[in-house]
Image: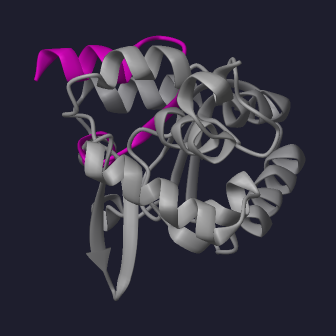
Amino acid sequence: MIEQLFGSKTRVKLLQLFYSNPNRSFYVREITRKIDEQINSVRRELANLLSIGIISSDNTNNRLYYEVNQEYEFYQPLGAIFGSGVVATDAAPTAGAQAQDLKTIGNVEFALYTGQFTRDESSGIDILIAGDINQAKLTKFISELEAKEGKELRYVVMPIKEFQYRHRINDRFLLTVLESKHQILIDKHQIATAAEEEE
């Protein structure tokens, strides 16, 4: 049904990938791997989405990266359709699916991606997790994610009380992470949301 409405299965998978990962950039081969489609059809649909203005591109280290254009006039309605992960396929992992995976490592109250995920190295890390975490399950989760992403990830884990305390005192490290380009996966206390609204 959605494929019929939007013209192609590849386009739908691309929209799901981009809208479920709003601050994340992807290069062509990475996209092809994640949505499990032929590179030619991915390139064709990326060109279509780029010409409409739904996505934007940026060249870094001789590699072309694509991400959703949050300034696009229909960003919100398209986000409502594709960002929830409700219509996502197994082949197009979403932030919702990643948040579900995170829940297996313990009581995760806050989690975000930054660094290599968003091409913003200012924080010096790729993943921040706060909550009551099972160390063995965390190690397994990180190694599986590293295998999936094909790169080594830098991560920081802290108890939620420490996270809240650091947030309250405007801890420099936490402030840098929250000010960097990031993608929130879990925010049970609406901490980052409240901080963004204050800006």
Determine whether 21 is above or below 99 in the image. Answer: below
Q: Residue at x 32, y 40 (%)?
A: 54
The percent coordinates of residue 8 (x first, y second) are: 62, 40
| In the image: residue 195, left or right of residue 95 | left
Q: Residue at x 27, y 51 (%)?
A: 51
Determine whether 163 is above or below 172 in the image. Answer: above
Q: Is residue 145 visible?
A: yes
Determine whether 48 is above or below 190 in the image. Answer: below
Determine whether 69 is above or below 194 in the image. Answer: below
| In the image: residue 193, left or right of residue 164 | left
Q: Is residue 154 magenta?
A: no
Quadrant location of the C terminus in the rendered image: top left
Determine the residue located farthest toward the bottom in the rendered image. 62
The percent coordinates of residue 182 (x first, y second) are: 38, 44
Q: Residue at x 41, y 38 (%)?
A: 22
**Where, by quadrant of the figure, is residue 7 drawn?**
top right
Q: Is residue 126 visible?
A: no
Part of the protein shown in magenta? 176-199
Q: Residue at x 60, y 73 (%)?
A: 29
